[in-house]
Amino acid sequence: MRIAMVGGGYVGLVSGACFAEFGADVAIVERDPKKLAALHDGRIPIYEPGLDALVSSNVAAGRLTFGDDLGAAMENADAVFIAVGTPTRRGDGHADLTYVYAAAEEIARAARTDLLVVTKSTVPVGTGREVARILRQTRPDLTFDVASNPEFLREGNAIDDFMRPDRVIVGIDRSGPDGGSRAQSLIEQLYRPLTAIQAPIVLTDLETAELTKYAANAFLAMKVTFINEMADLCEKVGGNIHDVARGMGLDQRIGSRFLSPGPGYGGSCFPKDTRALTAIAQDAGAPTQLVEATVAINEARKTGMAERIITQAGGTLEGKTVGILGLTFKPDTDDMREAASLPILARLHDAGATLQVFDPEGMDAARPLLPDGVRYCEDALSAAQDADVVVVLTEWNMFRALDPLRLRDAMRGNAIADLRNIWSPDLMREAGFNYQSIGRP
């Protein structure tokens, strides 16, 4: 089976490499000259554990290619996947579908035979129907099958999520002459390796598939926000949030994942998708008040964390140095999109702090986003050197392994704001720190 993947970003590159690993011939179309040059040189433009080896092996096997010519990529293709960005549209929270619709029109113009066109990008309800309209209007001489196959990839664990998924959601447009049977047959062929391991393949309609992606991400965002509020309550009443989370998570109706307190969710999905879902719901006349509250609480939490740090530092950061451990929105990625570090560091900088930062993967991406004057350090102890306060913003494993005594010797002050709860309060206080974490005594 041959497929073309429009978009060589995070979703397109991971999905394309994994489809190639399944045995498909995959041609990825990427129009960014820098990204394309990197891919041709064997350099992966994003950080994702295991992706470099997966791409390299499938390129060597001849199953994975890169280029900027959509027509060439679609030569003899059975299906074309759209995996372009859907950023938040300025001003109203809606997803910007400019790239999706432009890709659909370009696919139609380049097509030489009947095709299956699959939307892999996260898109609002109704997008698949509009893609179908664009395809058929642009090329009425061809028959296009349309499907929605949203991705559920966690950054840092994307390959395993693709190869061993909880489920695969596929919405099929069954309004065509064959009732979608050709599209279903191609999808089943493509995902046969997952059927062999009994991964659930959920076949449904376009609208349901599109909504399922938003609903899943919004629910997880609410779960994160809920445990953060419970952490705040624990601090007021003397509870321990980790025990609360364990007690909740052992209930199979709730589950243990996404119950880790922190400074607020970020990344490429949760902030964008929760905003988009609230906009979709408002337009449909069915407001999602829980999701709206989640968005507002999460934004307030990020700025509130900065005030917490200032208070711990004695109420002022003028003339003080703050060491920052971690910048990315989560470990095992270089993604800075909507990271909690961005508003927190902006507030600390405005409060007069000198900022020393270290992140093992995210500093290049962070540089254009952080205030001028930030010092970028070569390791965690360098970021802590002569610091009055050290703040943990991302739970990289290397930070967990830091020797408290070496950390204490490096610092000028003794305040630790552990916003990811990576260290033992007892051990850190025994080492002489004024140690504060989230939701723990």
Image (cartoon, rainbow, N blue to C red):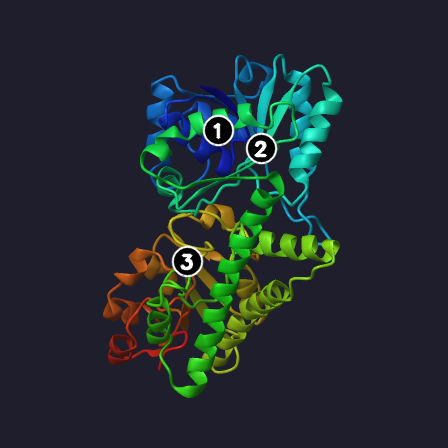
- Quick check: marks 1 and 2 in contact, CB under 8 Å? yes
Name the mark nearer the viewer: 3 or 1: 1
Residue identified by numbered label 1: 187
The picture quadrant where one finds residue 438 is bottom left
Q: Is residue 14 above or below residue 422?
A: above
Residue identified by numbered label 3: 326
Q: Quadrant of the N terminus?
A: top left
Local SS, label 3: loop
Q: Is residue 100 above or below residue 405?
A: above
Residue identified by numbered label 2: 147
User: Which of these two is toward me, 220 or 284?
Assistant: 284
Q: Position of residue 309 (x, y in %)?
A: 48, 74
Query: In the image, is 332 to the left or to the right of 341?
Result: left
Q: Quadrant of the C terminus?
A: bottom left
Q: Is residue 141 above or below residue 90?
A: above
Query: In the image, is 363 to the left or to the right of 269?
Result: left
Local SS, label 1: helix
